[in-house]
Image (spheres, rainbow, N blue to C red):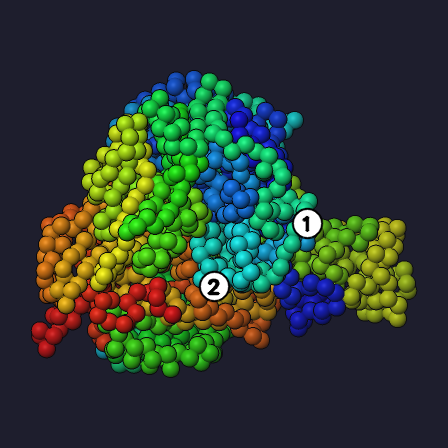
Amino acid sequence: MIEFVLNGRTEKVDQVDPNLSILEWLRTKMRLTGTKEGCASGDCGACTVIIGTPDPQGNIRYEAINSCISLVGNLHGKELITVEAFQQEPGHPVQRAMMEKHGAQCGFCTPGIVMSLVALHANREGTTPDDHRLLEALSGNLCRCTGYRPIIDAGRQALVQEWTPGAAHPAAGLGGGRSTGELNAINRDSISLQAPDGPRYDAPVSLDELRALRREFPDSRLVAGSTDLALEITQQLKTLDHMISVERVEELTGCERQGDELVIGAAATYQRFRGLLSGLWPAFDPMLERLGSLQIRNRGTLGGNIANASPIGDMPPPLIALGATLVLDGPDGERRLPLEDFFHGYKQTDLKPGEFVHSVRLPVPRANEQLYLYKVSKRLDDDISAVLGAFRLTVDNGVVADCRLAFGGMAATPARAIGAETALKDQPWNDDSVTAAISALASDFSPLTDVRASAGYRLQVAGNLLRRALLASTSSETLMVTGYA
Amino acid sequence: MRKLPLNTPTPAHTARGLAGHSVKHDSAWKHVSGQARYIDDLPMPEALLHAAVGHSEQAHARILSMDLEAVRHYPGVVAVITANDVPGHLDIGPVFPGDLVLADNIVEHIGQPIFAVAATSHEAARKAARLATVEYEPLDAVVTVEQALAQQLFVRPSQTQQRGEPDRALAGAPHRLQGEQHVGGQEHFYLEGQACLVEPTEDGGMFVHTSSQHPSEVQKLVAEVLGLPIHDVQAEVRRMGGGFGGKETQAAPLACVAALLAHATGRPVKYRLSRADDMVQTGKRHDFYNTYDIGFDDNGLILGADLMVAGRCGYSPDLSDAIVDRAMFHADNAYYLDQARVVGHRCKTHTVSNTAFRGFGGPQGMMIIEQAMDDIARHLDRDPLDIRKLNLYRPGRDTTHYGQTVEQHVLPELMEKLEASSDYRQRRAEITAFNRASPVLKRGLALTPVKFGISFTAKHLNQAGALVHIYTDGSIVVNHGGTEMGQGLYIKVAQVVASAFQVDLERVKVTATRTDKVANTSPTAASSGSDLNGMAALDACEKIIEGLVAFAAKHWSTPPEQISFSDNQVIVGGQAVPWETFIQSAYMNRVPLWSSGFYATPKIHYDPETGTGRPFLYYANGAACSEVVVDTLTGEYRVVRTDILHDVGRSLNPEIDIGQIEGGFVQGMGWLTTEELVYSDEGRLLTTGPATYKIPAVSDCPPDLRVALLPQSPNREATVFHSKAVGEPPLMLGIAVWSALRDAVASLTDYRYSPPLDTPATPERVLGAVTASQQWLTKHRKTA
């Protein structure tokens, strides 16, 4: 059985199919139809709801998520806030601004947009979010009618207005970010959810329990944020017989510096590790901003991005470039390997039955180290990369003392460009050596043509990204359209 | 007799929310609070079943056998039907035959429905529908426009519009250029996917809740597939979660399938498409292959043009005849072509049947002449804006290649104003200087016009009906044949009614569109919603007012000319009677308080045999100036600023019109930039969801977006309060972005070379244009 708070009231759910998404549960079991299905793949945001996650001190982190690809088992011990919490007129400042600015036309995406903006409003923490944060909060909400201008205006207007919910308000927690009595009364233990004679979902809270479950059920599927796994359910119509969630295992959700290493837990969400990671390597920040949407980054985890072994996962190339070590854990204990050795082929990894990704360890930056991260996709917001280039260079007195060049989208796995690295190493960091490295890329990779880009484009851009890195290291020119005012 | 304020100046604003005011959408609170109901949100009737269909896996094939046993035995499945189970018409083609509700023997595109399932849950129906074993004998499949042109495979005969002797003009012109382009299609991506809920009625008919722009067609086709008279079927549309043309004909097949399943089971059936099924199964904007051959003088004035537009229609005609017609009608966009020929081909391919999409072929036609404008400018080393302005329709050069005279010359002045307000010339100079100094990033600028013909080109569709009821407390209901898809039609028509009676808008309510209230309605399409339905509602009001004035004249013994409506009162001579009191008296005196209204657009005619006529009552106009910045290393770009000046006549609701303009512009920009439909060589759509098909997201909205309505520009035609249609025309403002991208890339050759740039202009295609420009430069340096 799972327990959670829905719009201020405790719900107990037992004997449901854990393949059910939160959206499906809301719409079909509760007949709460304010939350909409636009795509069932986490790409449009019409299903956006707010999840409140308590920490041990009783503070609640409120985040907008895609309910269409979040599974119902994930709700245990959390607070779920839907648009139905805001059906008393005159409504939240966000709703009033959306009406005044004509921010809704057909209205179908609107509840999701309202929830994204309400989440941003709740997370103001005494400051008014700037346009940058506003656009980030909306990057996962598609609107086909308005062209967004009135929605942006509505956001600007609402964010400077106060809103204090009464204690009886269904979203009272958003006022102070403190958990309610109902939430505190829910147990923090491991849970298991099972449909009658049907699929099962376990959410252990300790590493030992996780190891034990993996030993007992090596064929079970591991799930964290389910931003990728849930697509098997909603898009391929699969039924997953047994899922084991890692997201409540505290040892896996952290992110901290340990000596000369940054250690990121496999179940740490992007939002959780983004600050520390970008603090050490500022190049991550603009890249992470374009990785999925805020809703995805609130749920997606580093371990998930690595373990699903997609050739276009955005985190492996930079982590490979930085020389990351992957820590795997399982019934036979822990083992470590360089991240690039983890990927064997398309969606094939070194993970053995019963094993799971524990964490990633990154050596902190050394002197003279430069990191360039470039993501190329059709659309700026929430798009999958055609090519992602990640280059770590150490240039001493104008000579490339060390370099690691990794790419996504260029092969069946995220991969290093060994030939290009060789062409650059111990050479002057200049046009000639970069041109030689670009030529070497053609032997390093034979990329595919697919819906995102042609092989020719991928190869041309991969080379041009190296050229951009050279230009960026020697010039103060703005080189990217994202940086252009 | 009192005259309506039809051709008067702006209606007096004595009550709240009348026409001309920026009133918020009638469902605004319901939208923001999640209380607006779409089809899937309706309370579920008892014993509801859910529908799904099995799809063809072949682009063109004969079905040899179909084993549906596994489908029938899947838990929850209640009924499985095929073409053999259709009691009435199998063909549900909206205009011409060719669309079967379920395929019969031959399949003609991947994704074509071949059988249908009703099950006790949405999930069970979808899972069961995947379990069929179908044996196909593959037949030759044609996938692209070029293949269809090579094989002369068309869904409808090709058409030609010609004036004068274009060949002679081209041969004699001082300059002559030829060009070609591929213009991509577009998925509607309405946020609410296709959906309907069909309930059997007590007398053997069906009641259909549908998300459709054309409830009358849904009604008619459901009746036809069931073999029922039309009056046994009724359809209702409260609202759509977006339409954009995608729910003009494409909602009906779903309703027919659901009705067939409801008929087979005697139970209500809901049928909603998952996003992927929606993208695979329903038609999209036609992609086009266009060519031009244009002759011009030293100044760039066009002397003759030979244009060809060829659209990919897919496997059936659907609306493609009219869509390619409209592409032909708009191949001139805003320019006088002089001696001209426009040929339009309706190419048949074994892909989904393409359909209406905001602009209805017009945008695709305009693209060819806008490419030519840029090319002429580069050829003559002139600013493209000068060439565009030079060739605009003007008095004396005012007749289109299909013989309609442009009577209201809005654009010459509108473009001058936009040129000034956007600082075009100054920014042009700044951009040229920036591009010389910037090694990687290049900026581009373009100012392009839109002239869009308003009226259905199928003349009979230019009619509308409405019902207006006044109840005894003075509250008013208006119901009309138009549908609400977010565009604000309901509120605009309510404002028209409030204006007619001069009462507060809160007194007027618009109710769901239903085929048993107003019959034989036209689709809400062709930007005609408020033009047609606003006028029909006004006609109903006029009839009621006629009776009310006659009553008041007699009742209060006052001459009719001394009776007027103002500020929630009826002024009878020197006496002001409050609206409620007046209505009460009228009711007690047995005066009719409700009426129907009707409107048929005047003046329009077109002869397809000669390719001439006046297909449009008037033209809507606008222009956009867009600035982009392009990364010449990757082809990535951003729109940094857009200025728009648009002509909506005298606006019924300025903020709602601006919403249409901005939304249309961004949708048009998306069509020409990031929205890419990718098909395999076998004709399989590969971009079947928002993960791979990228409509504009929030960061794509130009950070500097300045939109204004052209002031003091009432429609010269007698439209409702002299407003102009606004639904489709702004989409084509997005062409400015594409032209600006070409402009940015042309800077690489100092604007001497006009790089080809097919659409959608994805970063990959933009980089291709960059590479082509660099190669041109290398070649011309060598030969220099």
Residue A435 in the image: x percent, y percent? Answer: 12, 62
Q: How many marks?
A: 2
Tell me the chain of label 2. Answer: A
Q: Residue at x 44, y 80 (%)?
A: B420
Left or right: B508 with respect to B445?
A: right
* Above/below status of B146 relative to A249: below
> Callout 2, which amino acid?
Asp
Residue matched to label 1: A166
Left or right: A175 with respect to B471?
A: left
Q: Residue at x 88, y 50 (%)?
A: B588
Residue A360 in the image: x percent, y percent? Answer: 30, 44
Which circle, 2 or 1, is nearer the viewer?
A: 1
Q: Quadrant of residue B674?
A: bottom left
Foreground residue among B265 and B545: B265
Tell me the chain of label 1. Answer: A
Foreground residue among A19 and B644: A19
Check disc 2 and report its element: helix, strand or loop: helix
Residue B294 — which label? none
Mark 2 residue crowding within 10 angstroms, few (<14) / some (14–19) / many (20+):
some
Mark 2 or mark 1: which comes first in sequence?
Answer: 2
Residue B568 in the image: x percent, y percent? Answer: 79, 62
* Above/below status of A106 relative to A132: above
Is there any visible trace of residue A37 in the rendered image?
Answer: no
Foreground residue among A346 and B691: A346
Is there any visible trace of residue B446 in the rendered image?
Answer: yes
> Callout 1, which amino acid?
Gly
* Above/below status of B58 relative to B710: above
Q: Quadrant of residue B49?
A: top right
Q: Residue at x 28, y 54 (%)?
A: A364
Residue matched to label 2: A131
Instruction: Tell me the CA gap for discs 2 and 1.
Output: 29 Å
Residue that protrudes farthest toward the front in the picture: A259
